[in-house]
Amino acid sequence: MEKSKDKRIKLIKELFKDDLYVPMKRKELAMFMQVSDENRAEFDSIIDGLIDEGYISVTQKGKLVLGKVKKAPKEKNDALSFDQNDENGLETSSKKSKKQKKEKLFQGKYIGNSRGFGFVEIEGMDEDLFVPEGMSLNALHNDIVEAKIIKEATTSSRAEAQIVNIVERSKDVIVGTYEASENFGFVKCDNSKLINDIFIPKQYSMGAVSGHKVIVDIYDYGDDRHKPEGKIVEILGHANDPGVDILSIALAFGIETKFPEKVLNQANRLNVAVSEADMEGRSDLRSLNMVTIDSEDSKDLDDAVSLEMEGEDYVLGVHIADVSNYVQENSALDREAIKRGTSTYLADRVIPMLPHSLSNGICSLNEKEDRLSLSCIMKIDNAGNVKDYDIVESVINVNRRMTYTIVNKIISEHDEELIAEYGELSDMFMRMYELAKILRAKRTKRGSIDFDFPESKVLLDDQGKAIDIKPYDRNEATKLIEEFMLMANETVASHFFWQEIPFVYRVHESPEEGKLEKFKTFIKNYGLKLKVGNEELHPKELQKLLAKIEGTDQEILITRVALRSMMQAKYSTECTGHFGLACEYYCHFTSPIRRYPDLQIHRIIKDSIRGRLTPARIKHYEDILDSVAASCSRNERKSEETERETTKLKKAEYMGRHLYEVYEGFISGVTNWGIYVELENTCEGLVHVSSMTGDYYRFDEGKFELVGESSGKSYKLGDKVKVMVHDVDLAERTVDFILADFDENDAVHDFYKNGRRG
């Protein structure tokens, strides 16, 4: 018995020494270590013993920290903070003010964390500053702050900082769940990076009841002793109402779900049929055989394709809806579009960049209706080289609205019934398939990388509940359209680069040296190498690596780690190339209904075609485009994060329907608090260290070991394991697994399934 207690003491000591340990209260620590009620007395005696011997101590806020806390005399108006030379020491504000004159302050964005600590992102600095718990002043997630360094960076840890001033409060919408009391209430924020509940006086509750999802306006940000205070400005509905969960996430990330009335009215006035006056001066391409090819549920059809033969050459037309004809610069529609930056695709809805009357109406390339477009018509030889091209304003009329499913059956399954039904269009599809393969081969030859790993879509019932997870069907028809859009984007970008006029490019920089070195170390464990010449990686080398692992057990893992090692693509006025596509010139031209950069460059293209690029107009674009590119990049990140979080929520909801079921997956992450496992259906969950059997554990990068006579097991990235779904947390959008070293019919499984459940 005593031996067992010694092991627990050793485990707790190791936890306090860990760099990633975050100070927490005794109760929080017990919950973190999953101490059962029957073991709580022993746990308390261990903690008391460690305090008595001075191994750990208790801060004024009741948090347990390693070592002793040095006390400072409490004087009126003295603010307490960590001493720069002693991370557990304290100093008064009078000392701080003298020091502050000499200390350099860094301004950046505060990034909160649910565990109480945070980070400050500073432009131009490679690594964020770490802000320990209690050092954040009363900063909230996304506030602009000033911070001073209290502990310099080392080879194994980043610099630590204390926030000394709030420069600008975030404009983020605060969304959360209301909990009512007799005379007041609290709102628990949906965003876990906002750790404080918000106090709501009774008169500011709008009559909300417990469980209501609400939007809160904060009027007092509180301090070390007081919670932020706010008033409810909108009730979204009850947390259990269909769709409210996803709506809450979208609003919390600042995604606008409603259009202002002025914008809607303007869009409705524009949704009228194309007139003869609208077509004047445009190339009339209505006689061309052309189609749209999209998924079955697509409604905003912004690209059509055509293909003719000219001798041995292919004449490919990519025709894009001329949204700029309807959304004039600086109009109400335009201001709303740049504010959104992009459409956002969530599990149960699309939040569009433009109102539906435009995106699904006059700007959508609907079958057998005249539409205004911008066309990029390219003559391509049988080696995939663009011999000639023309970029024109046009009027088109789509012959058929096709789906990926039908086109794929024609080109790769040779469905005779469909081939007969679509007649000469079927012949065009086969020639398109030939050209797409030529273009893909050329792209592959130059080193373009395809990160082709399983993606999935969560299916919902009519109540918005997750009922299934299906893989996305990426077939030959989807790849065909991808190749044609890539070709048009490259052609347009190259044309305007050599014209030397202001433009918005899509750029993707080479991987950072530090991330590249970590990736090289990681793949070395699998006997793989990555050749880097002149300290720079050529995409061809990464492409070779991915080809080598194709079809192996490690393919998904290594591909994902490779992707995480890449820089994020962004919009820029500088044409610095696209690493992933291995091309010098690239832009986004093909989706102006759902992306603002495409709409912006359409205006530049039309000014160029019409000879309107005067020095004054060029100066105008030089003045605005850097800001447009930066804004669109930020909005893209925000939209992607929202999409990712709603998917995580629905995956957790789906796995909640499968508690105590056993699955096989692979280890997708290794940390000092456990291992992450990804299932075949793309759901990921954590096996917490507290659920593992071992005398103690040892963590090394990429490897997690349980050590002791009864275990001696080792887990590393990529290993296949069996896990059982143990719990889900919808508020945190997480799934908990336990290792399932048992059969589903075993007594161990019955214990969890029946005993725990009961």
Image (cartoon, rainbow, N blue to C red):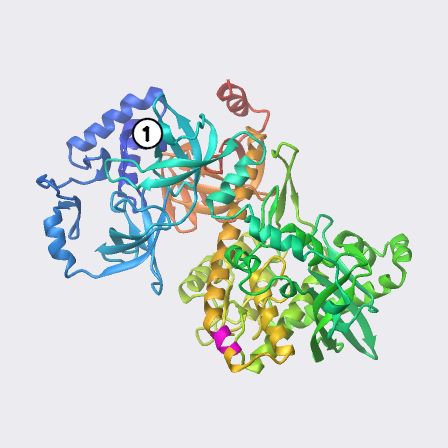
In the displayed structure, 436 sits above or below 678; it is: below
* Apparent side of residue 416 relative to residue 236 in the rendered image (left or right): right
Q: Residue furthest top?
A: 758
Secondary structure under tag 1 reads helix
636, 568: nearer the viewer? 636
185, 458: nearer the viewer? 185
* Apparent side of residue 493 relative to residue 85 in the rendered image (left or right): right
* Apparent side of residue 91 relative to residue 151 in the rendered image (left or right): left
In magenta segment, residue 618: yes
In the displayed structure, 516 sits above or below 382; it is: above
Q: Residue, x 47% and y 56% (percent of image)?
A: 525
Quarter of the figure that contains the N terminus: top left
Q: Is residue 115 visible?
A: no
Magenta region = 617-622
Q: Crowding near pointer 1: few (<14 within 10 Å), some, many (20+)?
A: some
In the displayed structure, 694 sits above or below 363; it is: above
* Apparent side of residue 517 relative to residue 488 in the rendered image (left or right): left
181, 542: nearer the viewer? 181
The picture places residue 485, in percent across and down from the top left corner, at 67, 66
The picture places residue 632, in percent across and down from the top left corner, at 50, 61
Give the residue pinned by disc 1.
30
Q: Is residue 202 visible?
A: yes
The picture places residue 61, in percent across and down from the top left corner, at 22, 35
Q: Amino acid at mark 1?
A: Ala
Q: How many marks?
A: 1
Magenta stretch, overall SS? helix
The picture places residue 410, in percent across and down from the top left corner, at 83, 57
Quarter where residue 647 is shown: top right
In magenta segment, residue 114: no
